[in-house]
Image (cartoon, grey):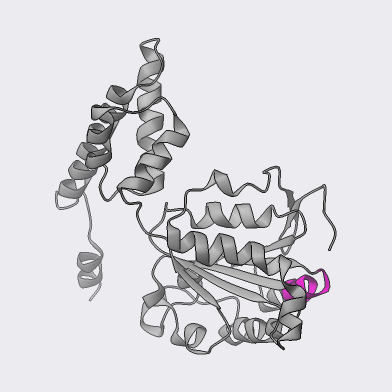
Amino acid sequence: MQCQTERYLETAYSRTRLPAPYDWDSVVLDATARRMVRTDFELFFQREEWFRQHNLPYRRGYLFWGAPGNGKSATIRVMSAHPYIQPYTLDLSDAEEKSRDVLRMFETAAQNTPSLVIIEDLDRAFPTEGKRTQERTVSFQTLLNCLDGVGSQDGVIVVATANDPTCLDPAILKRPGRFDRVVQFRNPDADLRRQYYKRLSPTLGGEQFEVAIEQTEGFSFAQLRETYILGSQSAFEHGREVGVTDVIEAIELQTAGALELKTSISASGFVRHAETSASRK
């Protein structure tokens, strides 16, 4: 393995420079995700000889699942920045992405190990038969063949994401070895919310801060970040450093906005999918 000073993310048609450093401290993970992803990923590069001695395939497959905004993509960005690895990404929802492009990408990854193949929103690209909304440009069998074939290629890591794994075609999950680690990225609990806010601003604390932590029950990391950004904007307008009161005000505004949107959906002007379907009968 060689340390790569210039980092690029390869796609089927282009490459994008990766400026981010390899820094696991840039993401907040719960204990399960930390053990099943960070620890496992780092040990993978240290135990190549151990894998071979025990006649184990020197590969890994990860499936990250959970609601949007809880760190799946952020974790993949850290993995992509590993100094020894060459990352590749596939956009299966892209109409321009063809089966031959997927085959070529997996072949290239196998020729440039250690490599990371990223497949995001797998549940949108290959849902169960009853939940398909559009024709696929990449055949399902091509994906399965690539996942199975890459299992014999040393040094290849596949990481896929899904918001709802129950929507996935069972063939993706039912065969052992396609994904060694299936990891849920949950909404953060109180300790993780506290840790996340502290990373954004170490000065946050005190009794009011605990009120903010309680009020954000059920928030995703992305929603927490939005409350901090909104609070920071308010602090800037008043010419002061962001404080707990700014964050609490932002939390209340965000909660009220979400409630208003939820109740407004039933008002005139919003068309539900069921109503649309009924009107077409």
Q: Residue at x 41, y 56 (%)?
A: 68
Looking at the image, residue 154 lies above or below residue 10: below
What x and y, as percent, mark residue 201?
44, 29
Q: Main secondary structure of the magenta part?
A: helix
Check if residue 166 falls in the magenta segment: no
When asked about the image quadrant of residue 48, the answer is: bottom right
What x and y, as percent, mark residue 251?
27, 34
Q: Determine whether, in the image, residue 184 is placed left or right of residue 91.
A: left
Q: Determine whether, in the image, residue 234 is placed left or right of residue 173.
A: left
What x and y, as percent, mark residue 281?
22, 76
When asked about the image quadrant of residue 210, the answer is: top left
Q: Residue at x 18, y 41 (%)?
A: 260
The residue at the far top in this view is 239
Which residue occupies the foreground of this view, 3 or 122? 3
Looking at the image, residue 8 lies above or below residue 103: above
What x and y, as percent, mark residue 23?
63, 46
Q: Which quarter of the image is occupied by the N terminus?
A: bottom right
> Which span is picked out in magenta?
105-112
Which residue occupies the foreground of this view, 172 or 155? 155
Q: Is residue 90 visible?
A: no
Q: Residue at x 19, y 51 (%)?
A: 265
Q: Residue at x 38, y 32 (%)?
A: 228
Which residue occupies the foreground of this view, 134 or 227? 227
Q: Is residue 149 visible?
A: yes
Which residue occupies the foreground of this view, 216 or 265? 216
